[in-house]
C-alpha cells in the first residue's frame, strides 16, 4: 500500500514513517524539504499519485491566531483537491482532544476549522484527536512561568508519548475509514499541575508548580475535563515515569 505522510519528517511523522515501512508499505515522507508543500501545492499531485492513504501531520510554523487558521485552511483545501484527483481512499488527520471545548484557544479553533474541512471534503476519513504529548511538558511549563513559579490549572491532564501516538496513527491508517473521530490518550490521568510538577522534579528543575484554577493554557481556560477524553479512548502503553526513564537513556 502506498501511504503519503504530510509532515513526515516531524516528531510524529518520522516515527510513523518508520513503523509503516517496517510493515512493508511504500511510504512517502512528504515535507517542504522533500519538495512537497501543502501550502503552495508544490509537489502534492506527484506525491499523491497512486496513494491509497494520506496521513496529515502538518503543523503551522506560527501559532498566532490568524496565521494558524490560514495554515490549516489553506493546507486542507490543497490536500483535499489533490486527494480527490488522485483517488485517495482514506484521509487520516491528527487533531487534539478538546479542540471544540476551548474556544478561547486560537490554535484549537484552527484545528476545529481543519476538522470541518475534512468532514465536508467527501473523502473517507478518520480524525485522530490526541491529548498533549509528553515531549511537550517542558515547553508547557516554560509557557506557564510567572517569575520563578509555574502556574497551572488543576484540570485533568492525560499526556501521551510520541511513540504511542505514532503507533496508534499507523494502526488507524491501515484500518478502514471511520468517517468520524478516534480519541487517543496516555495511560494515566491526573491534575495538570501535579503531572508537570512530577516532570520538573524528575529532571531536576527547581521551579515551584502552583495550582491555579485561573491559569490559562495558551489563552484558553482549562476546566476539569477540557483536555481529556470524555468518552471511550484508545490508550497508549507508556506511562510518564517510563517515558522519562527512556528519555534520560537516549
Image (spheres, rainbow, N blue to C red):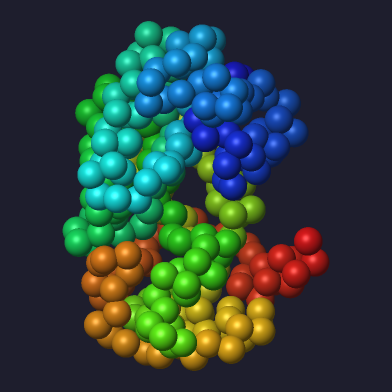
Position of residue 79 relative to residue 209, above or below, is: above
Which residue is at the front of the view, 6 or 237? Answer: 6
Residue 80, percent across and down? 34, 21
Quarter occupied by residue 117: top left
For residue 233, side relative to residue 238 (left or right): left
Who's the residue at 57% across and 45% down the image? Answer: 12
Quarter occupied by residue 218: bottom left
Position of residue 59 relative to residue 219, above or below, is: above
Residue 182, percent across and down? 40, 48
Q: Do we see residue 188 in this rendering?
A: yes
Identify the residue at the far left of this view.
103
Q: How many marks?
A: 0
Position of residue 144 relative to residue 178, above or below, is: below
Q: Do we see residue 53 in this rendering?
A: no
Residue 216, percent across and down? 29, 73
Which residue is at the front of the view, 109 or 239? Answer: 109
Who's the residue at 59% across and 54% down the image? Answer: 162
Who's the residue at 35% across and 29% down the image? Answer: 75
Which residue is at the front of the view, 85 or 202? Answer: 202
Who's the residue at 42% across and 70% down the image? Answer: 143
Quarter occupied by residue 250: bottom right
Identify the residue at the far right of this view.
249
Residue 39, percent across and down? 37, 26
Q: Quadrant of the N terminus?
A: top right
For residue 209, side relative to residue 220 (left or right): right
Amino acid at each position: 500500500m502506498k501511504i503519503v505522510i504530510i509532515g513526515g519528517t516531524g516528531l510524529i511523522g518520522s516515527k510513523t514513517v518508520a513503523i509503516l515501512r517496517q510493515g512493508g508499505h511504500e511510504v512517502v515522507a512528504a515535507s517542504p524539504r522533500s519538495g512537497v508543500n501543502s501550502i503552495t501545492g508544490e509537489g502534492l499531485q506527484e506525491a499523491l499519485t497512486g496513494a491509497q492513504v494520506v496521513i496529515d501531520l502538518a503543523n503551522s510554523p506560527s501559532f498566532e491566531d490568524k496565521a494558524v487558521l490560514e495554515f490549516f485552511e489553506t493546507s486542507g483545501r490543497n490536500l483535499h483537491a489533490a486527494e480527490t484527483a488522485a483517488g485517495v481512499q482514506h484521509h487520516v488527520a491528527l487533531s487534539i482532544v478538546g479542540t471544540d471545548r476551548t474556544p478561547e484557544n486560537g490554535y484549537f479553533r484552527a484545528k476545529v476549522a481543519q476538522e470541518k474541512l475534512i468532514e465536508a471534503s467527501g473523502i473517507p476519513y478518520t480524525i485522530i484527536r490526541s491529548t498533549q504529548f509528553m515531549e511537550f511538558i517542558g515547553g508547557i511549563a516554560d509557557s506557564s512561568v510567572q517569575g520563578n513559579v509555574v502556574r497551572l490549572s488543576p484540570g485533568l491532564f492525560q499526556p501521551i508519548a510520541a511513540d504511542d501516538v505514532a503507533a496508534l496513527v499507523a494502526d488507524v491508517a491501515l484500518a478502514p475509514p471511520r468517517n468520524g473521530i478516534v480519541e487517543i490518550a496516555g495511560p494515566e490521568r491526573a491534575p495538570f499541575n501535579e503531572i508537570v510538577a512530577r516532570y520538573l522534579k524528575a529532571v531536576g528543575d527547581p521551579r515551584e508548580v502552583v495550582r491555579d484554577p485561573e491559569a490559562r493554557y495558551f489563552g484558553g481556560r482549562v476546566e476539569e475535563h477540557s483536555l481529556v477524553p470524555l468518552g471511550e479512548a484508545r490508550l497508549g502503553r507508556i506511562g510518564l515515569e517510563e517515558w522519562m526513564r527512556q528519555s534520560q537513556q537516549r
